Image: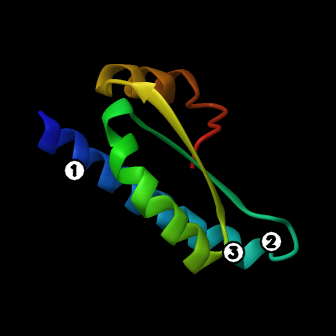
Amino acid sequence: MKKLAIILSLVLMATALGCLNQQTQTTQTEEQKLIIYSYDSFEYLASEVIPKFEEKYGVKVELQLIGDAGEVLNRLILEKDNPRAD
């Protein structure tokens, strides 16, 4: 189960990176912010990855820890018409 959570978190991060590329092409003057929804269990890994990512790409990352997979999925479904996360 932990492996699944890590794999899904990495997939979300990769998806966010794909969206990031599109954002950088459109707005260079604004401070860029990447909002990521994730499981609570991802927090330990995020504390190592996010600062390096922010430094390398110059983008502020806001990690919103939501709970388990069901809660993350529920939030994404509820926000499908007006998503807040990347």
Please name the residue shown 53% across and 64% down the image: 51
- From the viewer's perspective, tell me whether residue 50 is left or right of residue 9: right
Give the mark, 1 or 3, whose residue is nearer the N terminus: 1
Residue type marked 2: Thr
In primary-sequence order, the first of circles 1 and 2 is 1
In the figure, residue 56 lies in which quadrant? bottom right
Alpha carbon distance from label 3 to label 2 = 6 Å
Q: Which mark is residue 7?
A: 1
> In which quadrant of the rendered view does residue 22 lie?
bottom right
Are the residues at dot 1 and dot 3 in contact (C-beta closer than 8 Å)?
A: no
Badge 3 marks a residue whose secondary structure is helix
Disc 3 and disc 2 in contact, CB within 8 angstroms: yes
Q: Quadrant of the N terminus?
A: top left
Q: Where is residue 55? Give x, y as percent.
A: 60, 75
Residue that carries the numbered disc 2 in the rendered image: 27
How many badges with numbers are in the image? 3
Give SS at disc 2: loop
Instruction: Say which amino acid is labelled 1.
Output: Ile
Note whether 36 is above or below 75 in the view shown.
Answer: below
Q: CA distance from mark 1 to mark 2?
A: 30 Å
**Dot 2: few (<14), some (14–19), or many (≥20) neighbours within 10 Å?**
few
Residue 32 left/right relative to 20: right
Secondary element under disc 1, as helix, strand or loop, is: helix
Q: Residues within 10 Å of mark 1 (few under 14, many from 20)?
A: few
